[in-house]
Amino acid sequence: MTILERLTKIMEDNALLGDIDVSTINDDTTFDDLDLDSLDQVDMAMSCEEEFGISIDLENPPKTVGELVSIIKEQTGLEE
């Protein structure tokens, strides 16, 4: 399972996507595109920290899915 697939699974499991089709999510997708408010973004960050064992700077959070994937790659050494 790729990092992106794991992220979309986290979003699905936390009911953050509403009626958004996960197949449309890519690196350029912003969290605004996904209609995630600031609380949803904090929930997402906390879930990612737990899932991947990383730390996300919530004062300067990622704006796109691709930025979050990059953070995960940098901190874990995982590849797509």
Image (cartoon, grey):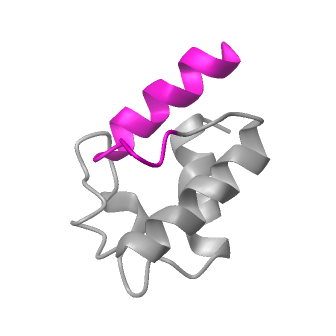
Residue reaching furthest front? Answer: 59
Q: Residue shown at 44%/38% (left/top)?
A: 68
Q: Which quadrant is home to the C terminus?
A: top right
58 vs 51, left or right, is: left
71 and 2: which is toward the camera: 71
Q: Residue at x 47, y 75 (%)?
A: 39
The N terminus appears in which quarter of the rendering?
A: top right
Q: Quadrant of residue 17?
A: bottom left
Q: Is residue 80 visible?
A: no
Point out residue 28 in the picture as x, y percentages from the top left corner. Answer: 22, 42
Tell me, yes or no, if residue 29 can be seen here: yes
Q: State the residue at coordinates (31%, 39%).
A: 27
Give the left or right position of residue 65, taking residue 58 as reference: left
- At which x and y percent is residue 52? 73, 38
Q: Position of residue 10 (x, y in %)?
A: 63, 61
Question: Looking at the image, is 72 positioned above or below residue 6?
Answer: above
In the rendered image of this protein, does residue 53 appear above or below residue 35? above
> What's drawn in magenta, residue-wise?
57-79
Q: Does 77 appear above or below 21?
A: above
